[in-house]
Amino acid sequence: MAEQVAAMCEQLIKAVNVIMDAETSQMFRLEALKFCEEFKETNSLCVPCGIQLADKAQPAVVRHFGLQILEHVIKFRWNNMQQQEKVHLKECAMQLLSNGTHPILEEESHIKDVLSRIIVEMIKREWPQHWPDMLKEMEALTSQGEAQTELVMLILLRLAEDVITFQTLPTQRRRDIQHTLTQNMESIFSFMMAILHINVEDYRKLKETPGHELQARAHCRVAVATLNTLAGYIDWVSLVYITTGNCHLLEMLCLLLSEPELQLEAAECLLIAISRKGKLEDRKPFMLLFDDVAIHYILSAAQSADELAICKQSSKSQGVEVVERRYIFLKRLCQVLCALGNQLCSLVGSDVEVDIPANLSKYMEAILAFTTHSSQFLKSSTVPTWGTLFRHETLSKDAVIVDMAIKYLRTSMTNLVKTGFPSRDDNPSCEYSRVDFDSDEDFNSFFTSFRAQQGEVVRSASRIVPLEAFQIAAEWLQYQIASPIDVGDTASKTAEGLCTALSPSVIQWEAVTFFVECVVTQIFKSLEEKKLPIEQSMELLQAVLNYDTKDPLILSCVLANISALFPFVTHRPHFLPQVIYKLFKAITYEVGQDNKAPWTKSVKNVRRHACFSIIKICRDYPRLILPCFDMFYNQVKKLYLSNITLTHMEKCSLIEALVLISNQFNDFAKQQAFLDELMGSVVAEWTSDKMRHVLWDPATFLSFVGADEVVSEQSTDADTTAHNRVRLSFCLFAMLGVVKRARWPADPEDAKAGGFVVGYTAAGAPIYRNSCTAQFLALLPNLLALIRTQNSLFMPENMARLSETFSKAHEVMDAEKNVVLGLPHHLLDNYDSPLYRTQLERMQGFFTALYDNCFQVLGNAGPSLQQDFYTIERLAEEITGSAFVSLDHVPDHRLRPMIRLFLKQLVLSCPQEYYNSLLCPLLGPLFAYMQQRLNAKWQVINQRTSINGEDEEEVVCQESQVTQEMLEEQLVRLLTREVMDLLTVSCISRKVPESAANKEEIEEDDMMMDSVPSASPAQSTEELTELGKCLMKDENIYMSLLTLSFTSLSWKDTANCQRTATMVCWTLLQQVAGRNLLPEAVTWFYTSVLRGLQVHGQHEGCNSALTQLAMHVYENLRPRYMELRVVMTQIPNISVDALDQYDHRLIDPNAQKAGDKKRKDQFKKLIAGTVGKALCQQFRKEVHIRNLPSLFKKTKPDKDMLNSEAFSLSGLFSPEDSAL
């Protein structure tokens, strides 16, 4: 036997060395690996070989493999081992703990880790029932030295992680161990605290004693391990253990913050403790940390860490670098302070009577110190706490917080400035950013989010001190206006002397603009009209209007400031002409005199910004603008007649603005006459014979827009066709602007007086008419023709007409591709690059915008025209004959806007009386078609996945091909969601119950007792909408809806599956369950749900939703359809007896009914064989841990408890009752 073991060990050592040798060939390594794995799986000498290999005389890799063998035996063979074999293995493992390791500072960490795993695996199988003295044995081990003490700590930590955190055991075993841990928690905690105390004291003594450095380090290592273990327990034990002895544990942790070698682990423990939720009463002791002593320890630790966080790279070098451990410690301390603030906000003003701490100002100064730190990450960590404090009902009124609000606002003047790019060295925060961020793009993305969070807090602070906030904003903006422009060291690509996105002036202007916007929005909400700083705001607005700059990036900020300050103009209307003049000037902004140079994005943004500002002003303050209407209109006419280049979007923005003002005429005839004048040229061109010929014939259309011409990038021949495209786009944009913005007066009396009311409904509600109806009806035939023509463009004969230049004109644009694929959008470099760089990109942009706008016009027509739109003769046939033509050829990315922009809007706005005449004829065929189309697409995707899986090694795909496949799949997924969203909006109305009570107190506070799942919050209920009821009356439509819903459950889109299973499937099926459904249909519905479980069952959310749905279907239809039982019997590994029992309770009216939870658990077990596994779980070897005799045996009482004298409520809850 010994010779066999020795020989086998020799072979195993050779195999391990071959595996670990970098020079080994792949073939030899695989052979050695196979030999080792086969040995672990099949050899009977595993235990003796493992013990021999684990001997500390062996090299570390060999010992590690030996210990791995022992771990494998315990995990996979324990259930089949004899009792004496188990005892032998346990004794050997304890012997290894006792004297099988090197001294604590010499032993490899991976050896300690695997050794602790071995013990924990045995504990999970035998404790407490078969190994009652385990804790005592562990305690005894700690007396043997530091190495053993550290191992015991690792064992306790691993045990807590497996049982509590990851819950990697069967339920009963987990409960047994958790219960026993809870029972012994007082002694476990005392034991850990004693170990920590002893080793910290010894470490402090010995580190100062010369010649005892190694011994001091050993004690330090044990203290670190103990703190790590404490961290694993503090998270879930009862708060009593954390706060006992006047918060002795927290006091000890605060003291350790001054020990450089232990401070990080101590801070981790402190953070976990202070972040605990639970009952407010139990959290009250945390307020002790607001004492001067505790705050002093935290602040002094932060101060010393901050001083040591940055060090020089070398004595010669001037550069500095961040000391990572010190910096991480600073982050933890910052989080500790923030967690403390959250506890304060929870306790103050609650039912638990807690006063505002006397030294609140000291705490706030500490938070402010982190908010003003150079590290952007530290600044961002404090933001949520500031927000909570400023929003707190009681604390926000305290003088300290009010004072801090002003200080915070002043600090924001620095924090809102985007500095600290990792690639630069122009700010102290750059050094920290190099540790926190991988690239400038990464930092930029973080800062965008950080600035948005700061905005929320600035708004909250402005509510507390509105006038002071405005004063700060005004001073900062005045200072910025007076400052000369600083271009910085980066040169613009377009013109000399212009700023870039990273120029100092630009980042300052962006920051002050953001600040002004945040402050001004709040001042109107927080102050009465008479207290508003009108004069000061007008002075500020005048300064902004007078500020003249040619830099596009700064001009954008100036326009934003004008928009932000505009609400004050309502109190001083004489400023209005100046504002309008400034905005009109910006609409025609160009960098240089050379009109032929392509506009950059920053120039486009200025012009677009000006347009949107005008629309916003006209939308929000139309009555204010109305007196200036003639001036405004003349200015627009002048612009149209001048030689200044205006894009169609800019022209249409001005039309939108004019329409918004005209809504204030309150006179139908006057507004109609104005709209006729405004849109006269558009209507004339759109309805002309030439345009009709273009819009009705695909070949003529392609020729008109130039898509059939070969064009070079330098060619001037494209000017005519480019002009044609602009004309088409302008007509559509103008149409959209009028239909979207033209409305009758909001006041019914004004509407009636102005001639907008044409009658009343049976219920007495007024029926309105829109001034733009006549124009829209004139434009509609050609609009529908254009939609039909655009759909026809994807037919093979029309695709063949595209020239070589524009062969990809209908493909997804690059920017949209990136959005669909979730690729990052690089923001830093594109501010001065042209919008469309090539002829192809221009054509792609044209087709995309044209297609979208057609459906936007139709989508807005319903809400805008109401009955004038819905009563159009043969409207359903007209839409079907245009929007639904040639759908087989229309790509997925073009179908999405049709559903989202048009059909969804139509469903939401259509009155009930037009459901049968308009919506049912449209939606019925559409859902039937989309079910077939999407099902075919998903089948292709599934086949592609399975083929790729089988031939993965043979087929090496090109990267572009892979990207294209990913894009196609994602587009199918997005289209699926659009279709299912349309179905849900059409059929389902959701009633959400009252929100649950404060969840903070229902935290797993005493989760140690047991993780009994709490009752789920009240579920929302789904009902059919009126449109849904209408659709479900038609057999063809309801079968299409059901088929689409149930088929979609097995498409590879978890989000859609969960939503459809939860909200849609049963709500629809329930409506027809009482009708005479064919048995085949019922079987198919049920099988579809089980197929969904097979595809998505590994996802918890989908699993729960599908199980609930399957149970609904089975329980409601099984009594009438025996076929469902046949389906159940085909489920792998189903227990027929359990199924019989379930069916008996379901069908027999006299059978005893189980509770909901029990029924659901039983049903879940029945269908468990259908649940699919994640790929990572499919080939995993199962670990089976057997249950031991229960610790909670239910004993039947020998006598009648009710007649017993001892039985009473007071007796039940008596502390002396040890039986409980």
Image (cartoon, rainbow, N blue to C red):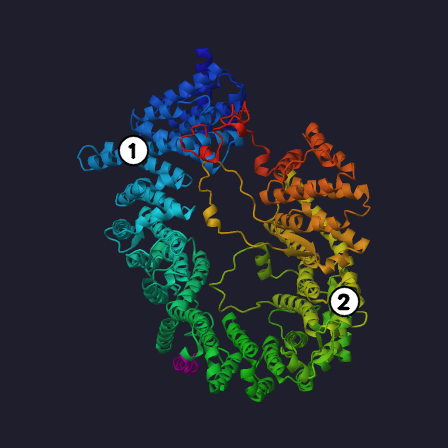
Looking at the picture, does residue 404 appear above or below residue 31?
below
The residue at which mark 1 appears reads as 194
**Residue 913 image label:** 2
In the rendered image, residue 175 lying in the magenta stretch gets the answer no
Where are the magenta residues, as a range? 533-550
Residue 290 as seen in the image, left or right of residue 540: left
Q: Position of residue 62 (x, y in %)?
A: 41, 25
Which residue is more in the foreground, 355 or 650? Answer: 355
Which residue is more in the foreground, 1196 or 892? Answer: 1196
Determine the CA span between mark 2 and mark 1: 79 Å
Amino acid type indicated by mark 1? Ala
Q: Are marks 2 and 1 in contact (CB under 8 Å)?
A: no
In the rendered image, residue 534 lying in the magenta stretch gets the answer yes
Which mark is first along the chain, 1 or 2?
1
Residue 455 as seen in the image, left or right of residue 1093: left
Q: Give residue 987's quadrant in the image.
A: bottom right
In what element is the residue under mark 2? Answer: helix
Task: Look at 50% across and 15% down and name the residue there.
Answer: 82
Task: Look at 79% across and 56% down and name the residue there.
Answer: 1033
Looking at the picture, does residue 935 appear above or below residue 219?
below
Residue 398 as seen in the image, left or right of residue 443: left
